[in-house]
Image (tube, rainbow, N blue to C red):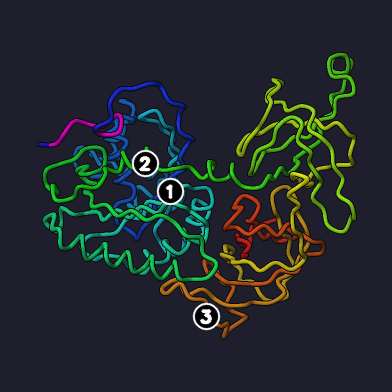
Amino acid sequence: MSTPVLQTPSGASAGPAIPPAPVLRVMTAGSVDDGKSTLIGRLLHDLDRIDDDVLEDLRRASQRRGRGELDLSLFTDGLSDEREQGITIDVAYRYFAFGGRSFILADAPGHVEYTRNMVCAASQSDVALILVDARTGPLEQTRRHALLASLMGVPERVYLVNKMDLVDFDRGRFTAAREAIEAIEAGIAAREGVAPGRVHVLPICALDGDHLARRGDRMAWHEGPLLADLLLSLPARAALDGKAPLRFPVQGLIRPTGRAAQARWHDFRGLAGRVESGRLAVGDTLAVAEPGRGEPRTARVSAILLHEQERQQAQAGDSITLVLDADLDISRGAMLVHADQPAVFTDRLEVDLCWMDERPGRPGQRLLVKQGTRTLAARIETLLGVVDVNTGRTEPVTDPAGALRRNAVVRARLHTERPLLADAYRQLPRTGSLILLEPGEFATLAAGVIRG
């Protein structure tokens, strides 16, 4: 007999109120037909997070397609092509909350040709849920998703060995899959320049909901946490960003205009932006991070505004308006840091790139590099290696003309027209990432992370 649906961590007792945990950004990944969409639909259904009218629509859609009374995979497969083919193409986002915590969940596609979609989802995620079919164990696409999640700095990787019902809930099959997963992660951990992460492996049956939000008796041999409990306990990347050095890229200058505005905000000059990492407070001394200017230009923080309300401090993730006590020449694209923690700049960056455009790239190609609010002209100076997604090793480039193809992961050196912030993605993921743009159309060519 299954236990009741969980709304809070299992076994938790009532106690004093605690501050809500930061929003957790979760993504799913896995090979085709491993059950990603079913997992999400069943989890939200068993947590009572699907509205009645949506459930009724799902029932009608399920019956129309001959899939029984209720096919919960249709909840996330929103595109008509996805519902017709029974696959995930685009990244589908869902927002929900339970147990006092809010979640943003991204269902990423499993096909290799949509790897770039998975990379986009991973770049914003705190947790990667990687599904593995219990019948086959990890496949090539499993290794690809594990490597890309690591390259994009996803700190928590949860492997869900799904479809345990199709192997009669055999513990030995789960153990074999777990050992293969641990071998994959050991290979990733040994690779230079890849961010380490915490790994969790759970057996589940997404179709019936075993070990998602309730503990059934068909896998009583597994004493680990339920997926719902685990999600409530995992830390968000924003908490880690708050401990990093300050990075405040300026998005714009605020100078109120008009007679009414001048009457209230006379001589007001604010710098609008988002605190990408670190913390700052009123009275802190900040410097404009810029190369080749001699002594840094500094000023003290005289006010921090959030929706016109004054605050004494701000932290990673806060979108604020900053007021300084000195009128420095600052515009969009400038980076503010703590004066005692200067930033490093260089015009040659070693990066890992995931090529996204259908048109192949080439060494020497001229393009634009966008890092935060700053965009510079650059070129691909040289290719240093091609990442083998099966082994995680960086292999020599044998075909420079064909290396930069869609979905390929390549190590390269970029030469920018002016020095760019050289934050390593492992320490500062928000500013250690960048995108490459085609100069004429501004189409996205590749996503990259700075090595260091």
Closer to the camera, 71 or 65?
A: 71
What whole-number distance in Å separates the C-alpha atoms at marks 2 and 3? 36 Å
Which contiguous range is marked in magenta? Answer: 2-10
| x then y, percent, for residue 277 | 63, 44
The kind of residue tagged 3 is: Glu
Residue linked to disc 2: 231
Q: Residue at x 33, y 27 (%)?
A: 51
Q: Name the image quarter holding residue 216.
A: top left
Q: Dot 1: within a 10 Å radius of its alpha carbon, few (fewer than 14), some, or many (20 or more) residues? A: many
Name the residue at the bottom extreme.
Answer: 398
- Indicate the secondary structure of the residue bearing disc 3: strand
Residue 135 appears left or right of 305: left
The kind of residue tagged 2 is: Leu
Disc number for residue 368: none
Q: Residue at x 47, y 60 (%)?
A: 196
Query: How many numbered marks are there?
Result: 3
Residue linked to disc 3: 395
Name the residue at the front extreme.
Answer: 340
Q: Dot 3: within a 10 Å radius of its alpha carbon, few (fewer than 14), some, or many (20 or more) residues? A: some
The kind of residue tagged 1 is: Val
| x then y, percent, for residue 59 | 25, 34
Q: Residue at x 59, y 66 (%)?
A: 353
N-terminal of the pair, mark 2 or mark 3, is 2
Q: Are marks 2 and 3 in contact (CB under 8 Å)?
A: no
Residue linked to disc 1: 127
| x then y, percent, for residue 440 | 75, 59
Q: Dot 2: within a 10 Å radius of its alpha carbon, few (fewer than 14), some, or many (20 or more) residues? A: some
SS majority, magenta = loop
Residue 113 appears left or right of 175: right
- Indicate the secondary structure of the residue bearing disc 1: strand
| x then y, percent, for residue 164 | 18, 54
Q: Is residue 56 visible?
A: no
